[in-house]
Image: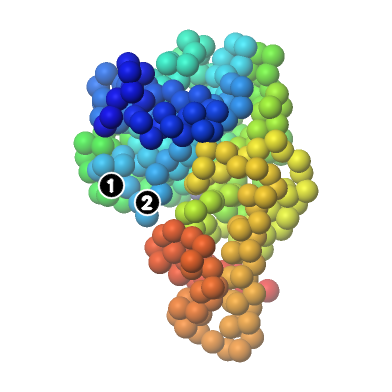
Amino acid sequence: MLKAGGLGLDRRQLLSGIIGSLLFYRAFPSDAAAHATTLVEVAPGVFVHRGEHAPGYTPANRGDISNCGFVVGGECVAVIDTGGTAAFGKELHQAIRGVTPLPVRYVVNTHMHPDHVLGNAAFRGDGTHFVGHHKLAAALTARAERYIAANKTAAGDEAFAGTEIVLPDMAVETTTSLDLGGRRLELVARRTAHTDNDLTVRDEATGTLFVGDLIFSGHVPALDGSIRGWISLLEELSATPAERIVPGHGPASMPWPAAATPMLQYLQAIATDVRDAIAKGRSMSETMRTAAEGERANWELFDEFHPRNVSAAFAELEWE
Ligand SMILES: [Zn+2]
């Protein structure tokens, strides 16, 4: 890595920091110097780490394959998603220490997927509350064994050490407000869309909306809930103003509602083609090879996730 002065910034990051007029912080955990956590301050006091696009865990990425972030209030910090392993969660925690000494009082999980929640263990203690959709605990409990086993195998024992499921101790039924000290976050439990436990987090001070995996950019979306619910929720959210959103996969922040347009186009293409295939009596396997093929050029990891999305949509739309 090319170092720029003593800042620990490599040249590419320094350049993009200058171009984007954004502050980059790079914290070097003493026990994992090879894995520094890069943060972007997308709005005053709102920091985001961008995970890499990958089909899954590897020993090299340590489950750092989704976006996470944190908001600094007057008295405490709220973390929004924690990455995919305790090792990565620890790096994120140390990166937060590079920004503020305030305690992490809340860890908010946007939904159940392992790459968003399996870093939680790194934040346990000091009275930290774990917050999620009221359906998150049941969803995680049902999948715990599979999530741990599959990702441990993929990441390897070393990268996965200390990683475990940490269930929420605060459940959001409809909406909840978290007070960070002169700064409030509004949490909303959403209806089934990407999953059945999607939660959004709005920082009132800056109008920043963390949407979790309701928005993917670049990385093809992954459907694990309801295609009809996801389309209708995105249409509804598009009418709700926000200064910027933080997607679950993609850039650190994006303009709103523009970020919803490619998502809606993709999901609607699947819904249209799958309904057409069902009406014509085509099989699921045939539909998996043909539905929304026109979207291929717009997304990375298309072969890894798209056929599964089509089969999930087929199973749902077959019965409407
Ligand atoms: Zn997800």
What label does residue 58 carry, if any? Answer: 1
Tell me the residue at 36%/18% (across/down).
Answer: 7
- Mark 1 Cα shell of 10 Å, populated few (<14), some (14-19), many (≥20): some
86 and 133: which is toward the camera: 86
Residue wearing tag 2: 54
| Residue 305 horizontal/vertical position (percent) | 44, 62
169 and 49: which is toward the camera: 49
218 and 116: which is toward the camera: 218
If the image is split into quadrants, where does the C terminus sit? bottom right
| Residue 18 horizontal/vertical position (percent) | 49, 28
- Mark 2 Cα shell of 10 Å, populated few (<14), some (14-19), many (≥20): some
Looking at the image, residue 273 sits to the left or right of residue 120; the answer is right
| Residue 214 horizontal/vertical position (percent) | 59, 49
If the image is split into quadrants, where does the N terminus sit? top left
| Residue 208 horizontal/vertical position (percent) | 65, 33
Looking at the picture, does residue 189 appear above or below residue 286? above
Tell me the residue at 49%/13% (across/down).
Answer: 100
User: How many angstroms separate mark 2 from mark 1 (CA)?
Assistant: 9 Å
* Whether residue 129 is visible: no
The three-letter code of the residue at mark 1 reads: Thr
